[in-house]
Image: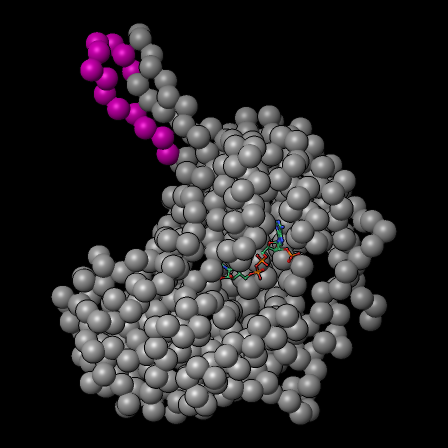
Amino acid sequence: MSTPTFLNYINGEWVGGAATFENRNPANTDEIVGLFAKGTAQDMAAAAEAASNAFPAWSAMPGPARGNILFKAADIMEKKFDQLGEEMTREEGKTLPEAKGEVRRTINIFRYFGSEGSRLPGYVVPSERDRVHMFAIRKAIGVVGLVTPWNFPSAIPAWKLAPALICGNTAIVKPASAAPLSAWRIVEALHEAGAPKGVVNFIAGSGGELGRALVEAKGLKAISFTGSCQIGEWLHGEASKRRLRIQLEMGGKNPTIVCADADFNSAVENVVNAAFFSTGQKCTATSRAIVDEAIYDRFVQALVERTAKLKVGNGMEPGVHIGPAVDQGQLDTVLHYIEVGKKEAGAPKIGGNRLTGGDYDKGYFVEPTIFADVTEEMVIAKEEIFGPVLAVMKAKNFQDALRIANNSPFGLSASVQTTNVANTFDFVYGMEAGLITVNLPSAGVEYQLPFGGTKESSFGPKEQGPAALDFYSDYKTIYLKY
Ligand code: NAP
């Protein structure tokens, strides 16, 4: 079978270029999932022009009519559900059940925001003055640029694109080069659903080149970015020069506190799930387990025993729990931090190696790795690794654990495992994170509530849930004397 080529999408047309780049399967690097047209700065400028031209009609369309296009796109993706899941596993490496769960989430996100088209809530309030009617309506802001990472290659483009479009904006999607196909499928679905030309545009290619072209694009009004802190910071600087609205979702070093009173077995499950599933490549993954000293030794042992049962392999195979790292660069980063961890904390309690031999040689597989007795000043307790590496730390009591958990510049997600109500509420109010879970893994969010971090993890309004509309719309306030 010949390798398919996926073109960029500008002004309702699929457009190619001279150059392409490869999207390879990280579980089997012999397999090219697809070739993608390598977008250029000229493509970005053309996409911005198309999106500007499409904006007046799209933003004037009634919200429910825009919603119908989102519903149709959801139905189209639903029909291809199995295919989309399999493609995601092949391009990103996560297991098939995880990939299908993400496709389900994308479909749900499109339906959720499709129905926002018939709400788009504003305000109507009583005036102090006689016979004055006061209200505020939401207005679209214009052309928005959406820059997304590879780790949730479908859900993240969806949770930016769907609210952007329903508010009446037009969009340019720039997916991650490591996994562009899942976002491409969303754009294809919108095309088939009848989105007018120019409303959505898709440009794959080098982030450095396209990022520069995006911030300079004529008519651009806002950028929503998910990815690394380094790129987010650069984008923020560039966007500020042009007074672009910007939303940044970036890194984390998420803690899970395990109290002595926790339901022990479920705490073990939750920590292992949050640390290792999706190969630890979730922005909400647990990378620090902070355990009360009263149960510390027993808990570390139980974590190791549970982790030993995890099967690493090609995510397409049944029974595999953990897929590969997404690419060579990510694998190298993980192996680098494992070496740092060995120097700082000694030999890991489990894992610590790249997996080799047989089919492992064709992919970027690494053992789930646990370091114990990690202390606050160690690099592996401070820096984001974004792989299946867990640092276990000992705390004197709950308050000490909370202090350690907050000793980080990041504040994305955080979890506590406890049966104590006072600890629960101290954590809810005292933990510096945008997303809190109690007796659940730190990762695994739904789309109906606001999502995003605090401190250096995030900047700007939250994504998802009703709050997502705030970034993608402005209020227009009307005072009307009758
Ligand atoms: P990344 O390297 O920052 O890339 C993210 C996106 O930015 C990609 O599309 C990339 O394109 C693009 N990009 C690269 N250079 C750019 C530039 N100069 N201007 C504009 N765009 C540019 O991050 P990643 O490695 O894909 O993702 C991992 C990071 O994302 C982790 O730090 C993780 O914590 C974070 N993340 C955060 C959340 C959250 O919600 N907080 C969710 C998921 C992931 P190329 O692929 O072509 O380089």
- In which image quadrant can residue 129 be found? top left
Q: Is residue 352 left or right of residue 267?
A: right
Q: Nearer the viewer, residue 100 or 288?
A: 288
**Looking at the image, which residue is at 83% across and 68% down?**
2
Residue 421 visible at all: yes
Residues in magenta, as a range: 121-133
- In which image quadrant can residue 195 be found? top right
**Which image quarter is the C terminus in?**
top left
**Looking at the image, which residue is at 33% across and 12% down?**
480
Name the residue furthest right. Answer: 18
Task: Give the total of numbered labels.
Answer: 0
Q: Is residue 218 left or right of residue 108?
A: right
Q: Nearer the viewer, residue 44 or 181?
A: 44
Percent of width and height locating residue 347: 45, 90
**Looking at the image, which residue is at 36% across and 30% down?**
122
**Looking at the image, which residue is at 52% across and 32% down?**
243
Above or below for 387 versus 223: below
Q: Is residue 177 left or right of residue 445?
A: right
Q: Is residue 128 magenta?
A: yes
Above or below for 54 versus 191: above
Q: Is residue 148 magenta?
A: no
Percent of width and height locating residue 387: 51, 73
- In which image quadrant can residue 66 be found? top right
Residue 244 visible at all: no
Above or below for 156 versus 366: above
Percent of width and height locating residue 359: 68, 87
Locate ligand 1 by image quadrant.
bottom right
Percent of width and height locating residue 133: 29, 15
Q: Nearer the viewer, residue 371 or 71?
A: 371
**Which image quarter is the N terminus in?**
bottom right
